[in-house]
Image (cartoon, helix red, strand yellow):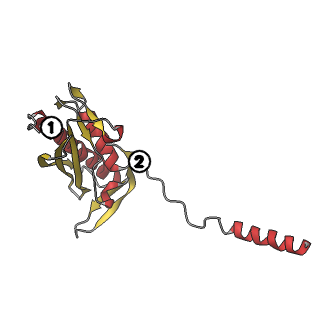
Amino acid sequence: MVLTRTLCALAGLVMAGGCLSVLPEPDAPGALYRIAPVEAGASLSRHVIIREPEAPRLFAGRDMVVEGADGGLRLVGGAEWAGRYTRLVQLALIDALSGGDGMALDASSGAPGDYELSWRVAEILVSDARARCVLDLNLLDGRTRAPMAAGKVSGDGAVTGSGPGDRARALSTASRACVAAAAAFVAEKAAADRPAS
């Protein structure tokens, strides 16, 4: 009986020792980057629900992507977004549309809206000379979800050096330009009269 308890205790200690991680800790990024606020130049006359955009997995997370001269994609070392890129760009657009009688609302609020923005991050990457952001936008009727307007906007940012911080700042600048263009698109298209249903 004592031998059985001792063997069980020994087996338990051996199994608990197997839970220890032998993998190296991931490197902490040197800096986290966000999308700087866009001046509120676009105002809404209606309520618009802003969904989190869809994106390829490579662009949707915290990693920043650089395109090499051979067309290969790799991660920008030492720099990351401060959160999921899709969430950062969604919140930046909501903030950019904060003026006017209408409101831009987060889809998770559950509030109804006159319009709904369904969108996709088509590209957000940096090369040696510039960063580029491309968004595909679809404005839907808030009640029927019928398509009301579709468009594509883009933004660029110049790479001023060769370090990870230079690339990250260019990506942030391109994203900010994309958000400003998306805000102008939404404000213009949401101001149009809705067809009678």
Determine the image quadrant of residue 78: bottom left
User: Residue 73 in the image: x percent, y percent?
Assistant: 29, 65
Could you tell me which quadrant the N terminus lies in? bottom right
Q: Distance between the Cα atoms at labels 2 and 1? A: 30 Å
Q: Give the residue pinned by disc 1.
A: 184
Q: Residue at coordinates 25% horizontally, 39% vertically from top-left? A: 49
Name the residue at the front extreme: 197
The spot of residue 188 in percent (x, y) is 11, 36
> Which residue shows up at 24% across the image and 53% down it?
121
Indicate the position of residue 107 as horizontal and vertical percent values: 31, 41
Mark 2 or 1 closer to N-term? Answer: 2
Residue type marked 2: Ala
State the residue lying farthest toward the top. 101
What residue type is disc 1 on?
Ala
Residue 37 visible in the picture = no
Q: Farthest right residue?
A: 2
Residue position for label 2:
31
The one nearer the camera, 33 or 18, is 18
